[in-house]
Image: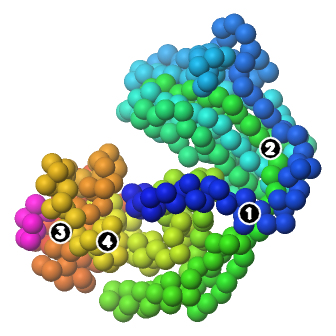
């Protein structure tokens, strides 16, 4: 996933003004007749409480034998009223899942879960699980959980670090057999998370259009078509990439185009401007063309190396970073006092701990220098040899065996 690339300045405001006009199409006429919300929770009960009235608290995760996390009321988003607050520390062993009462739902209807969240220094430590979000579960008439999108529950994108009040949402079709839904607030790592204005409501279905052209199968919303010139460029890049790598051709690329970053996150649950579906040859992007994700899709059968190679080779084949050559992009950042050493980002965890605007071009330039030194076939061999290696020492060993030097010794810096 390439989470760092930015949409043009101001585009969010433009799309926000016209989104309903083309996303809903004829369904917008039904808005005046929309059913009442299935759940509205403002956590406005007076007084102090540990669990909101009408909600229940159960164990959501266990990461040790330490004390239980804290739950209770705190000042609400608007500065008045209250919200639900969950918190834990490094020693916490039991993490609470605070769940709503059941809400009746109808199968094959679309529902939208939304809320506001704020966080203070939320991060996973030690054996903790990196969860800070809302969950939506469905059950049948016998009370059995009904999977949704192949998973036991749906989640909003997690919120980490320290974040001011942020709107989060997910949209999904109620799975067959489901008759009720429950919403839960969940934190299973250190820090403080606050939840407010939780809503679950039925919404009109989005009217996706399909365009099949060559090996691409495009999905887009009315008014958000992909230009013919962009489609031609997509086809040409795919053929060029397959020729350069010598890898097996992709039989088909399913390409989902979203008009806004917010809608992409709401429908997929994955933040960032673009990503490749884990279970299918499918790209999700806010752009009509996305070379970076096509590289990920083509190379996926070769393995899953640390991000320094996985993201690096995608940036390399994409041809630059934010419209500039990789060396130029890095020089500009270094001139502003911003850089990251290649030896500090050899594991995916370390890579993700730094600013994407530094790690992505640094990794791309690293791969560019590797290709210049040993050639693309050797780099692809390294890609396969380091698949699944998260220990920097193990990565260094494999790197030395395949390339013949350490990462820091690659020339061309």
Is 66 located above or below residue 225 in the figure? above
Q: Give 30 or 173, whichever is nearer the viewer.
A: 30
Give me the residue at 35% from left, 71% from top. Answer: 314
Give me the residue at 60% from left, 65% from top. Answer: 258
- Counting residues from the start of the chain, the first of labels 2 and 4 encountered is 2
Q: Secondary structure at mark 2?
A: strand
Q: Nearer the viewer, mark 2 or mark 4?
A: 4
Q: Which mark is residue 327?
A: 3
The image shows residue 344 at horizontal and vertical percentages of 20, 50
- Counting residues from the start of the chain, the first of labels 1 and 4 encountered is 1
- Quarter of the image for residue 199 reads top right
Q: CA distance from mark 2 to mark 4?
A: 41 Å
Relative to 391, is 327 on the left or the right?
left
Q: What stretch of residues is rendered in magenta? A: 407-413
Q: Is residue 291 visible?
A: yes
Magenta-span inclusion, residue 140: no
Q: Nearer the viewer, mark 3 or mark 4?
A: 4
Q: CA distance from mark 3 to mark 2?
A: 49 Å
Q: Which mark is residue 323?
A: 4
Q: CA distance from mark 1 to mark 4?
A: 32 Å
Q: Nearer the viewer, mark 1 or mark 2?
A: 1
- Quarter of the image for residue 4 reads bottom left
The residue identified by callout 1 is 21
- Counting residues from the start of the chain, the first of labels 1 and 2 encountered is 1
Is 125 located above or below residue 339 in the figure? above
- Counting residues from the start of the chain, the first of labels 1 and 3 encountered is 1
The image shows residue 19 at horizontal and vertical percentages of 67, 60
The residue identified by callout 2 is 201
Give me the residue at 65% from left, 87% from top. Answer: 212
Q: Give 389 or 160, whichever is nearer the viewer.
A: 160
């Amino acid at each position: 996933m390439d989470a760092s690339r930015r949409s043009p300045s101001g585009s969010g405001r433009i799309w926000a003004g016209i989104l309903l006009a083309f996303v809903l199409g004829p369904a917008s006429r039904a808005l005046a007749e929309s059913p009442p919300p299935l759940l509205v929770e403002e956590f406005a009960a007076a007084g102090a409480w540990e669990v909101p009235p009408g909600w229940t608290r159960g164990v959501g995760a266990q990461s040790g034998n330490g004390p239980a996390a804290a739950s209770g009321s705190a000042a609400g988003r608007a500065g008045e009223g209250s919200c639900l607050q969950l918190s834990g520390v490094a020693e916490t062993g039991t993490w609470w899942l605070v769940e709503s009462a059941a809400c009746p739902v109808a199968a094959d209807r679309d529902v939208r879960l939304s809320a506001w969240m704020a966080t203070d220094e939320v991060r996973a430590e030690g054996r903790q699980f990196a969860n800070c979000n809302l969950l939506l579960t469905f059950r049948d008439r016998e009370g059995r959980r009904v999977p949704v999108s192949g998973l036991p529950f749906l989640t909003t994108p997690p919120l980490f670090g320290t974040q001011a009040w942020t709107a989060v949402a997910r949209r999904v079709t109620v799975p067959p057999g489901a008759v009720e839904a429950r919403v839960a607030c969940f934190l299973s790592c250190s820090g403080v998370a606050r939840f407010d204005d939780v809503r679950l409501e039925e919404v009109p279905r989005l009217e996706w259009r399909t365009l099949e052209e060559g090996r691409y199968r495009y999905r887009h919303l009315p008014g958000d078509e992909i230009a013919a010139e962009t489609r031609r460029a997509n086809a040409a890049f795919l053929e060029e990439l397959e020729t350069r790598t010598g890898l097996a051709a992709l039989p088909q690329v399913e390409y989902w185009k979203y008009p806004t970053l917010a809608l992409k996150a709401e429908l997929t649950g994955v933040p960032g401007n673009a990503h490749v579906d884990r279970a299918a040859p499918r790209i999700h992007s806010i752009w009509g063309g996305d070379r970076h994700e096509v590289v990920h899709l083509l190379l996926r059968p070769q393995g899953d190396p640390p991000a320094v190679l996985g993201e690096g080779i995608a940036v390399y084949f994409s041809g630059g970073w934010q419209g500039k050559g990789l060396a130029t992009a890095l020089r500009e950042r270094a001139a502003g006092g911003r850089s990251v050493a290649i030896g500090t980002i050899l594991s995916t965890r370390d890579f993700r701990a730094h600013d994407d605007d530094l790690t992505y071009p640094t990794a791309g330039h690293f791969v560019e220098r590797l290709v210049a030194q040993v050639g693309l076939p050797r780099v692809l061999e390294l890609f396969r040899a380091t698949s699944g290696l998260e220990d920097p020492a193990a990565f260094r060993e494999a790197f030395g065996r395949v390339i013949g030097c350490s990462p820091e010794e690659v020339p061309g810096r």
